[in-house]
Image (tube, helix red, strand yellow):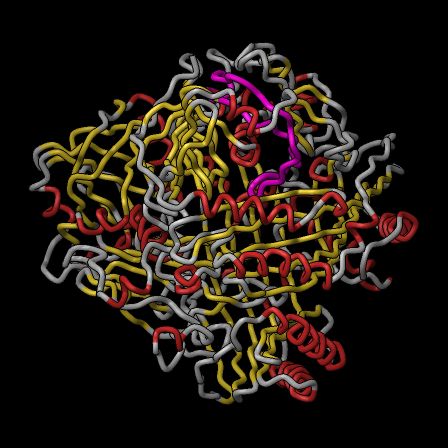
Amino acid sequence: MDRRDFLQFAGAGLGALLLPVYGRAIAAEELLSTVDIATKKKLADAALEAAKASGASYCDVRIGRYLNQFVVTREDRVENVVNTESSGVGVRVIANGTWGFAATSIATPDAVAKAARQAVTIAKANSRLQAKPVELAPTPGVGEVSWKTPIVKNAMEVPIKDKVDLLLAVNAAAMKAGASFINSTLFLVNEQKYFASTDGSYIDQDVHRIWAPMTVTAVDKTSGKFRIRQGLSDPRGVGYEYLEPKAADKVTLPGGAVVYNNSYDMVADAIAAAKQAQEKLKARSVKPGKYDLMLDPSHLWLTIHESVGHPLELDRVLGYEANYAGTSFATLDKWKEKFQYGSDKVTLFADKIQPGSLGAVGYDDEGVKTQRWDLVSKGKLVNYQVIRDQAHILGLKASQGCCYADSWSSVQFQRMANVSLAPGEAKLSPADMIKDIENGIYIVGDGSFSIDQQRYNAQYGGQLFYEIKNGKVTEMIEDVAYQTRTPEFWNACVAVCDKDDYRLGGSFFDGKGQPGQVSAVSHGSSTARFNGINVINTARSLG
Amino acid sequence: MGILTEQEAKAILEKVVKLSKADECSAQLSGSVTGNIRYALNSVSTSGIVDDMQLGVQVAYGKRVGTATINEFDDASLEKVVRRAEELAKLAPENPEFMPALDKQDYKASATFNAKTAAITPEYRADVAAACIEPCKKEKLIAAGFLADTQSFVAIANSKGNFAYNKSTGADFTCTVRTEDGRGSGWVARNVADIDTFDAKQEIAIAMDKAKRSVDAKALEPGKYTVILEPAATAGLISFMMFGFDARQSDEGRSFLSKKGGGNKVGEKLFDERVTIYSDPWDAAAAVAPFDVQNDGLPRERVTIIDKGKVEYLQYSRYWATQKNKKAQGQPGNLIMIGGDKSTMDLVKSTKKGILVTRTWYIRLVDPQTVLLTGLTRDGTFYIENGEIKYPIKNFRFNESPVIMLNNIEELGKPVRVGDDESPFIMMIPPMKIRDFTFTSLSDAV
């Protein structure tokens, strides 16, 4: 879902409903069923055989069933409850050294065989414009295997009434605490994906994700001012247990703000949001200048996403995304010379295996087993994120497993793995970290973000900003955004808290490609300190 | 599946509406065939055709509403989708803001379909890619681009006898050209209704020229500058501002159009008097469907949104219109801004000192209170002196509100048709000369 679709979706109604969901709404009980594996294997074999018979040197088949449930509320009412399903088959081939792709929503052996032949025809037609034949890194066939997100409680099994009751309780709590408005939403995703390839893999996966965002607004009618505080939850690759709060997951930060780890107290956060939105209306406007920034993981994930995750995608580095998302400053020559991406406190790793993360799967969408690897090691650039047809460019013998398609009807391509900042090795808590900051700003939650097409110049906002003076939080401030040049920013990192402070943030709808596709990705970190960062004041007057 | 005719669509929708046992039933049938080709590093990377059709059914028992959609169209599937919507409606809580189905409306047809655009073939798309790649190869430049062409239809019907049908086409082309050493980058974009008005050879020449001229960019100090913004560079900013034109948000106190003490700013002059923006579904250059599927099929009308700088129109949902005793009408599908006769280059010629901006990128809302937006220039930013483009300059980050920008107009040129990835509108936007545009930092990105 891109921003446009999301905004229209948020408007609710029949027309709005049709835009983002890529599928048909279904009754709740059908969200629980799965398609028989033998049937899927038969379909896959029909496509693989047809592709080979038409002259393909490689073929993979993805049989996908994508289930979503959305519950959308504001204040005291439910605006929409939607169940959707989209299912079909995508077939990708290599013929004449060129990729071809076709997809069908008709799940019969004849229809998928026809799609396979179409894919071969497209590949052959495009081969006249192919500069070099596709070179695939070998991936061993794994036979018939399966993987499932380790959920405790399948969110699709929770009655709609319980979900509606939760969101309306959240809204009531915020309104009681002084909010002028609240919008709260529950997004549930289940991807049932079957992958088969001419390498001899038949991989069945059942992937679950959950997100519970909210927006709380406080309006001061006399001054005409309004302020928004978004919820501080994170989308996760877990079940409904995320919304059953455990005391151990509540984290109270220096200065008193509360954030959450592996489970989320949505009602408590709504109350805090209502109070903080009102506090924001009266908070002092920041004095622009250089500050030491203390960045909470609920904020830092987005900075990692934009300034590390994207520039280290090899397709961007090579120029495949030049027309839209852009290229990257982190060029291959920088990798060869082990470019100083950050300070020696900075180790950034990629993975598709962290429990509870949005990126966690057993195998990627071209059948590669998932793993973890370093991108930046003690400050030095050491690797990128690649898929099978890119591995040879780095001299790698195998793909790292970063291939993903957001639907059976989309072509899979290189998407960001989870990219995270490794916790500091020395014992350090946020309470210890703040002690020696003389003139700083503590930022909690993600806000406005924008970065250039090579990922150098960025500007980030946040949800909550606190002034730090002489080792202590003094007061809330407003109108804060910081501007950075990526390598200078990461080289200004002087401390990272230890593993006890490590938390995940993430994006449910990261967009890339033409036509656009979305993916979900997590970014973990502990609280980190960056010295001497340029802070601007974003307040304006319209007269 | 393809594109259904009006009669075919009507036959399915009438069947659906008749099947429903609920108090009310509304249905929407839509389909599209989108062809695309994508190329990068002077080579085609992907191409394909996506053919999709969907039926959405919304039913109501009293104020309880249920919605279901399906992509199968045999009789059994039509029955199934209606029953699912009915089941969901029975489970749903009452919606106090429920609005009954629309009575029969009169819709005036809009010329949104072009047969030649609908007839684009895979060969044509490959030819467009080749027309971009080949000249670039010859000049040691690197092309990356995308062409997507769509034909689509949408039809709505309800149990009160309302029915509407619209068929449309469009094509969107973008191409980025970079120098081999990565020191220069140029871009071109064209959004057309009639593919015969598109010539890839002519367009690619623009991007190639900008790529070559942007090598060895000089750094200027960030600050306030007079800028010439090409139409594509302002489309994203204006489109963002339009999200604030919602009546309910304004009345609730959470838009830049909210008034101190309550109410909204309709009737107030907030922009330079040369700013007039209207919407007209029947505009020959930017025609859109004459009804709004986002709002139950409400008819669209010609509306003046900003008249000589004065806010004239806010968008009322059907519910909010009943609360405020206003008329609800379809949300505009296009935005047409009045300008003059001059081209972008004419505006350059009359500029003593300034900056020409080809494109803006990654625009995000920093503060909804003032519509403060941030973003960057990209793919062709040049310094102008005494009416001439003097040299390329490094890209800038801007922090600017379109409300302030539209108060700082020096001159407007001739509007051109623009589509934008992140905008729901087809737009006619003039090139603009703006004073005191705020650049806050430099970017090293090329």
**Which residue: 54% across, 26% down?**
B244
**Which residue: 25% across, 46% down?**
A296
Quarter-of-image position of residue A386: bottom left
Q: Is residue B417 magenta?
A: yes
Please, is residue B69 above or below residue A168 in the view?
below
Residue bounds of the magenta highlight: B404-433
Quarter-of-image position of residue A473: top left
Name the residue nearer the viewer: B47 or A305: B47
Name the residue nearer the viewer: A211 or B36: B36
**Which residue: 76% across, 44% down?**
B194
Relative image position of residue A53 (x, y in whole percent): 69, 89
Q: Is residue B39 visible?
A: yes
A511 on left or right of A234: right
Relative image position of residue B392 (x, y in whole percent): 40, 38
Relative image position of residue B373 (x, y in whole percent): 43, 31
A513 on left or right of A125: left
- Quarter of the image for the C terminus of chain A: give it: top left
Q: Is residue A543 magenta?
A: no
Q: Is residue B19 visible?
A: no
Relative image position of residue B359 (x, y in whole percent): 49, 39
